[in-house]
Image (cartoon, rainbow, N blue to C red):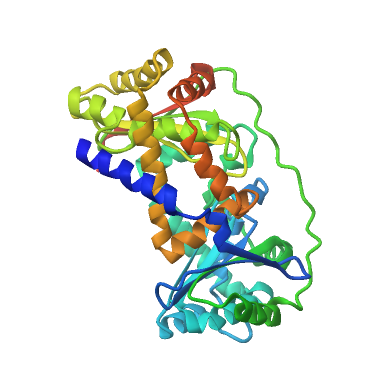
Amino acid sequence: MKRFETLLLFIVAILSLTAAPLCAEVKEYTLDNGLKVLISEDHKVPLATFEIWYKVGSRDEQSGKTGLSHLLEHMMFKGTPKYGSKVFSKIIQRNGGVDNAMTTKDYTMYFQTMASDRIGISIELESDRMTNLIMDPKETVSERSVVMEERRMRYDDDPQNSLFENFVATALMTHPYRRPVIGWMSDIASLTRDELYRHYKKFYAPDNAFIVIVGDVNPEEVMKKIKAAFGDMKRSDLQNVPVTREPEQKGEKRVYLRKEAELPYVLAGYHTPSFPHEDSAALEVLSTILSGGKSARLYRSLIYEKKLALNAGADYSGMYLDPFLFFLWGSPAPGKDIAELEKTLFGEIEAIKNAPPTEREVQKAKNQIEASFIFGQDSLYMQAMKIGMFEILGSWKLMDEYLEGIRKVTPEEVQRVARKYLTEDNRTAGILIPMKSEK
């Protein structure tokens, strides 16, 4: 393990010295209608990834209409007058490519990866469905049922995901992050074709979107095609609507869920800021110290030494537009008590509050984060995802600021953010209580 850590430190050091600033690789263009285009050339292989990001997610939905953005993502594959239902993906596949999409709390993103000389296919198809979606009423009803089944399988029938859903809705009192991206079941069942279409017309517009292209392309030639396909589209009349700020939590909240399950499960979360807040880097290093592999604190203490848990972890992601949560979780080993596991999890946090982590622990965590970030550049898709994610947060140029922040974290800063945010009054705790099957 020590040899691996030394090798990792050496690799990161070499990459840090030789790699040019990440933002220097991106060329930025903006059409008159507000559509931004970010292009990064990578000529290692004759491939290219095309992504189009819309600045709309579950964060932009209203109570009673949750799941609109996710259902609309499904409907984007149901055809236009020029390309019929389900034709989009078949065209990509016939040209040797792959495609998919995702909806999150903050954005909806569609992508294709294929031979770079066929990038014009993505441009044509995405420009067409940005404005010409049919949204047939029968297709809407059918796809609504598909999403309801997806929700049933991923959340309603999954004990840990059910707890997570209830947990987040309790931890956040007013902010729209409290609602699941897929939507509540009763809301999905009531969504209509007209509501979906209004959502589409409101948010799917060139000035509420941007394109990211990474691969073996000529930026000037690509921009000619993009201007021809998207240039005549009109701006939206979209107005910025302030999002409700989550009030400060002033006391621990608790959630208990009784559900058919094999094992109990404990989940805890603390309100924390998101990147580029000055504390986000130290919080990410803290989560990696706790849960960055088998030599990290939680695995070593709870699983290997005390044999108290089957699994245990921590997670912090600052990649949200608004403040979210720092998570801890675990499942007890057979014969072990869930209350003892919860107490021990919190005890690991108290240990860092009482004494800062070692320089070695902090450096190892920083190496892991930086290596993961840098090695991800080998994938065209991940390069595009990083550019797009930072653009959502404010600017793709924040990529360099992110790594600089990680490199500057000290043991004392890790201790400080643990003391500041990981407090009992700022905590929500959830417990899954297994029930025997009625069968």
Of the pair 86 and 146, the residue shown nearer to us: 86
Residue projecting furthest to the top: 354
Res 164 → quadrant: top left
Q: Position of residue 321 (x, y in %)?
A: 62, 44
Q: Position of residue 225 (x, y in %)?
A: 64, 82
Q: Residue at x 53, y 37 (%)?
A: 405
Q: Position of residue 417 (x, y in %)?
A: 51, 24
Q: Residue at x 39, y 61 (%)?
A: 378
Q: Is residue 202 above or below residue 17?
A: below
Is 37 left, or right, of 118 in this rendering? right
Of the pair 364 and 273, the residue shown nearer to us: 364
Is residue 288 in sight in this rendering? yes
Residue projecting furthest to the front: 17
Res 354 → quadrant: top left
Q: Residue at x 57, y 74 (%)?
A: 138
Query: Is the C terminus in the top left, top right, bottom left or bottom right quadrant?
Result: top left
Is 114 left, or right, of 197 in this rendering? left
Res 271 → quadrant: top right
Q: Residue at x 40, y 56 (%)?
A: 376
Query: Is the N terminus in the top left, top right, bottom left or bottom right quadrant?
Result: top left
Q: Is residue 99 above or below residue 175?
A: below
Of the pair 20 and 190, the residue shown nearer to us: 20
Q: Is residue 285 above or below residue 42?
A: above
Is 220 left, or right, of 166 in this rendering? right
Count the numbered circles shown: 0
Q: Position of residue 202 (x, y in %)?
A: 73, 62
Q: Is residue 65 above or below residue 258?
A: below
Is residue 388 in sight in this rendering? no
